[in-house]
Amino acid sequence: MKKIFLSVLFLSFWCSNAQQNLVQYVKPIIGTEKMGHTYPGATVPFGAVQLSPETDTISYEQNGKYNGEVYKYCAGYRYEDKTIVGFSHTHLSGTGHSDLGDFLIMPTQGKLQLNPGTASNPKSGYRSAFSHANETAEAGYYKVKLDDENILAEMTATTRVGMHQYTFQKSDESHIILDLMAGIYNYNDKNVWTYVRVVNDTLVTGYRQTNGWARTKTVYFAMTFSKPFTQYGQKNYETKQTYRGFWGKFNQTKNFPEIAGKQIRMYFDFKTDEAEKIKIKFAISPVSQENALQNMREEIKDWDFDKVKNQAQAIWNKELNKIKITAPDDIKVNFYTAMYHTFINPTVYTDVNSEYKGLDQGTHKADGFTNYSTFSLWDTYRALHPFFNIIQPSRNNDMVKSMLAHYDQSSLHMLPIWSHYANDNWCMPGYHSVSVIADAIIKGVYNGDQNEALKACVATAKHRDYEGIGYYMDLGYIPAEKSGISVSNTLEYAYDDWCIAQLAKKLNQTEIYNEFIKRSENWRNNFDPKTGFMKPKLADGTFKKEFDALSTNGQGFIEGNSWNYSFFAPHNPEALINLMGGKKLFASRLDTLFTMHLPDSFFAETEDITREGIIGGYVHGNEPAHHVAYFYNWTDQPWKTQAQVRKILNMQYKPAPDGLGGNDDCGQMSAWYIFSSLGFYPVAPGSDQYSLGSPLVNKAELTLENGKTFTVEAIKQSPKNVYVQKVLLDGKPVTDLFINHSAITNGSKVTFYMGPKPKMK
Amino acid sequence: MKKIFLSVLFLSFWCSNAQQNLVQYVKPIIGTEKMGHTYPGATVPFGAVQLSPETDTISYEQNGKYNGEVYKYCAGYRYEDKTIVGFSHTHLSGTGHSDLGDFLIMPTQGKLQLNPGTASNPKSGYRSAFSHANETAEAGYYKVKLDDENILAEMTATTRVGMHQYTFQKSDESHIILDLMAGIYNYNDKNVWTYVRVVNDTLVTGYRQTNGWARTKTVYFAMTFSKPFTQYGQKNYETKQTYRGFWGKFNQTKNFPEIAGKQIRMYFDFKTDEAEKIKIKFAISPVSQENALQNMREEIKDWDFDKVKNQAQAIWNKELNKIKITAPDDIKVNFYTAMYHTFINPTVYTDVNSEYKGLDQGTHKADGFTNYSTFSLWDTYRALHPFFNIIQPSRNNDMVKSMLAHYDQSSLHMLPIWSHYANDNWCMPGYHSVSVIADAIIKGVYNGDQNEALKACVATAKHRDYEGIGYYMDLGYIPAEKSGISVSNTLEYAYDDWCIAQLAKKLNQTEIYNEFIKRSENWRNNFDPKTGFMKPKLADGTFKKEFDALSTNGQGFIEGNSWNYSFFAPHNPEALINLMGGKKLFASRLDTLFTMHLPDSFFAETEDITREGIIGGYVHGNEPAHHVAYFYNWTDQPWKTQAQVRKILNMQYKPAPDGLGGNDDCGQMSAWYIFSSLGFYPVAPGSDQYSLGSPLVNKAELTLENGKTFTVEAIKQSPKNVYVQKVLLDGKPVTDLFINHSAITNGSKVTFYMGPKPKMK
């Protein structure tokens, strides 16, 4: 009796927490066409391995000149392409800069061809045609038929291990190629060194060292086959054969088990029966071959591909079930695909034994946290990390710890700008680590030493040698003569300084607060009251004469023009509104932004904006104006926030390969989607307030790590009923269009009442 | 009273074991001119750091073509040169192949010149003239005045740390250059990657990765200055400035603390007072920057240069005192300098925390032993390791363990051929690890698992793919068509196989014994009874027709001609004598070898033999005939061994910079000197017998690790009394001209009675 009772209890508990099948809504193919720069391959949440097909990996720099294709292939795969060259293990998701693509594997049959072939003649190499009809991309699983080879390729992953399954035809000449020359954004001297050990007839280990976006990057690997290879070999594409040592004692191109050089392609031969599956486990590590092997052994213990796939999808489903929404299926597809994309970056950069490579290129032990890399902070401080503070607080806590470890290891004594495989690539303006840290501390997510964290923020913000900070500190702005992105930097520093001030305030560090709250006003120094635009200012204090508010080139901005950047004072919209002439004028400027017609010349000068990616002059595909639609809330026309947010949600996110209007930017675009479709947005991370918009879902339940459930309900929500009539927080009216973070963590319920027409104030 | 009594006792004990000042006889300058290829710089016994001046480090490969100067600069320094370009931390001692020269440091004053300048115009760069009058080279200490800079440079070392002391003049422009492009045997793409972190104004860490003789080599470093530098900078000699990352945000050539690239020279600026000394501690590690720092901190705790120097010399003196000889001073100089040179290689390749990099490029912990690298086994199996079995048994035990660890880490499953910084450079024929291992086990020196050691030997000897072993196993010789060094390999494999057989016999492995004792007869297959020479044999079983017994080119030999190699059956001289027609004919062939006149053409075809390096046709400067002078002992004319040995001792070793007749070869030439001057030699390591020659010393006391003292006394020994009249072992006559190893370990005394004329049998 007792047993039965317990079982029933458990069942009942399980039912009330029943997981929905949400993986079904995830379409990793979204964003792989045109501007999204996402990849369709297999990964688990925040996985170190991203095992995904490459449709072009041979975009070598031509004689030192930029190859325009490089930008298109940030994620290695483009939906538009007709051929696949192989499957590699590391990928950036949604970035605007290319790198990675380590360890390309390709199965072939028949005569061995150890070169990648060309897209126009894939049969000239190991490249193969494929069609989307024979392709499946799911969360944690990717499948494609390689038409030229008639091989079915399937892949799945754990955090640190990619698992391949290739279904061959009967042949005495089946091959698996490991191309150690391939990489995304390749050029002649990118491969610094490659080392491979053929340990036995199923196990291969080694490393690959590159000089790319990550300047000093080494990825170690351990690779094992489900079946012994009959022979193996390599081709070393360095032609120089000199008297350096005595390697001539071995035939280095065949069955030499210790291989080293810069340009190496390897092959492994098999005899296969009809429909025989050969599987590969491919583990990576930032630290050592031994760690890679340990990662492999601990994460995948047997050869059951379906089990690994099912585990991967179960993990995804568990993560996705943290938010259950009521919405039409196409919105569910957008929503859960967005959620999928937010849970890809940053990526785990720690081995199972807690070791990782630090910024100092030394091996460190992550003591009580998981170390992460791939911090695209200029993008992700805006909505991704705030989203994590709600739905992944433990991970965001670890991410902050990773950023502070990076700081500790930095001989520059700086927090990360763009942390990338034990390097900083210094990409984009600002020092937005401080926003992520302040937001995490203010929202109670960071459990480390808060004063030490503040110290790191202050040290970073006072690094006079970095990107005009000295001028900024002395003059309150960066002279246009001194920097091509002087205005972007000044505006973003000012916001970051406000974050430091908020953190200092919380920690009762009055002196620091006073210093940085003052610095946070520096955005005013680039504001030209005559024109109402942010403008580059010269060292003599006058504004630069040549000025084009539409142009993105040479105006002091990056990934944005003055029209978009002029609204960049997220921490002080009231002051900005006053400077711009009051609420009415401000709202009409916003109207203009969202409705203007941009000339063709605007698109000619940039590679990362298309007509699809904009609404009027508002560029959603780039980040600087991500908060701007919410600025109507500070005017007397908040219904325009509601209308614009819904418009952006509908126009910029579509359940199709070309559904993303711009680079997903490591999940920032997707995080914007999730916040906005839930009806609220963190306009100024570092504040505990969210600004209300117009929910796209009918209902959402957010299961928090503290066990509470935060609920959003949108009564009468429909594509036409985009206007908020009334908002209740736990039954009490919300009159100011804000909710606090505590409302979420307390497990409150926000109820929006929607209607077809604006509710005037 | 009690106290005084104890002191007296102690004093008396100390006196009876009193160390002599033997460091005074060590002249590291010996061998630095002409052929010796030794270096004059500072090192401690078996030290990982060899801190020594470079007189030419810019011997770049010219357009992929061999630069003849490379061979001359194996040790970086040549006595003949007039300029010094700097002081670097790693050097090979006495080799015939070039590599290393990591981390070149040079002090300068005045206008900074970040290029090395030229020998003809040293002032065009940081190179400086020097003179031997202002130079001191001692064991563990090197000093030189840099004339162009008027800076006194001094250096000393611990095992893993080099210590520099530069005495500057008063100047606001004093510099210390760290040239990370420099290296011995440099070529355009030898530098694979360099990484440097300026941690603070006294500490710099990083690593240097090269593709040289050691194909995949990384040396990590930590460098600290006794005084903060006022500024630092670098010049990156890679000219490409592209869009790879955002390094443009920093001035990479000045005060950028994280430096990475392939071609970097750094400088550190100081203001100096008159005669101000700036000191540097420079630690290296095979594993990590962190380990390098730990090595530094544990080995040199303060800034007392003289203390470190005194410690280094005390350590040397302790090692040298293991053999106390009675002899004239010039012989003492030769003897103790030889002993110094035998205690340089192999070098410690373990950090103070016991970590080292293995052949698999992974980090390993040396469990209960010190790991060594730099095993020039083709040279050193002959006399150096046998010498260690007597005087450095603990270290040789560790060396055998290092070789077996190398085997364990080898994916080829091979013992080392030429182990070199976690690589094998596969230099020279044979698999002589097995000789070192068998000799150590047979002489009771190896305390590990002897059967596992035998397994490694057998596996290595059966590696069919390596250097003709398959042919050797199938045919009993290597066809000349298949290898340019077919005869050398067959002869040396046969000897090595005999070593395996001896080991198997000791371990009662009858099957292995039978197999390998049979293989050990294979040397007969290259013997041509018609001519009495070892000759290359074709696949069809006939001898190659074109044959020149004098030539070292294209005859199937390496570092030797048939005249020298035809005596290569050290393990079976009786059989060789029979094949050559009996004792008398054999002795007359030996006579011819030592007396023939070689034509000039002989010297034209080789770079490593000069007229000074030979006696008749006997090439002492190369190793294959090192045992040959002792072969008279197997004939009826053993006095000729005595005469020849003394002749070689006198002609090939002189107390002068050009005193070595050939490459010292990591101590093999020096070990030959020590054995021979003590009156005995290990003709066939793997046997426990030593063949007696003619002592050069009057007396020698060898203090063994087991506490016993082995004594050699040569009564009436003099330059004229080179002939042995009688030998007593502990008072009993020795009639067969052999002593056993046990005589040494038991602390016996061998007394030679010498005279001016041969004592006929």
Image (spheres, coloured by chain):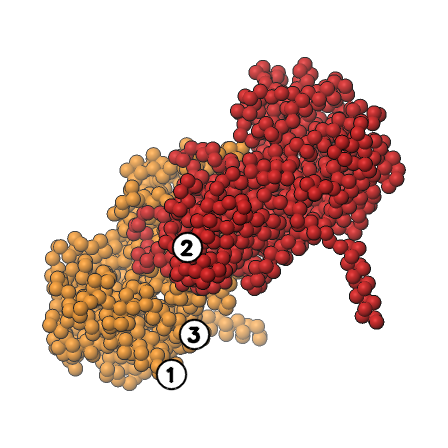
Chain colours: A orange, B red
Considering every residue shown, the one lying at the far bottom of the view is: A732
Look at 83% across and 67% down and name the residue there.
B5
Instruction: For marks 2 and 3, give the CA distance.
Output: 42 Å
Q: What residue type is disc 3 on?
A: Glu
Instruction: Say if mark 2 contacts mark 3, CB within 8 Å.
Output: no
Nearest to viewer (mark 2 / mark 3): 2
Q: Position of residue B21 (x, y in %)?
A: 70, 51
Task: Pick the quarter of the image with the C terminus of chain B.
Answer: top right
Asked if residue B519 lies left or right of residue B179, the reply is right
Look at 66% across and 17% down and name the residue there.
B528
Q: Residue B331 appears in which quarter of the rendering?
A: top right
Q: What residue type is disc 2 on?
A: Gln
Q: Is residue B187 visible?
A: no
Instruction: For marks 1 and 2, give the CA distance.
Output: 51 Å
Q: What residue type is disc 1 on?
A: Asn
SS of the residue under disc 1: loop
Classify mark 3: residues with Cα within 10 Å, few (<14), some (14-19) or many (20+).
Answer: few
Q: Which residue is mark 3?
A: A452
Q: Is residue B636 visible?
A: yes
Q: Which residue is mark 1?
A: A508
The disc placed on residue B109 is 2
Classify mark 2: residues with Cα within 10 Å, few (<14), some (14-19) or many (20+).
Answer: many
Q: Position of residue B140 (x, y in %)?
A: 60, 51
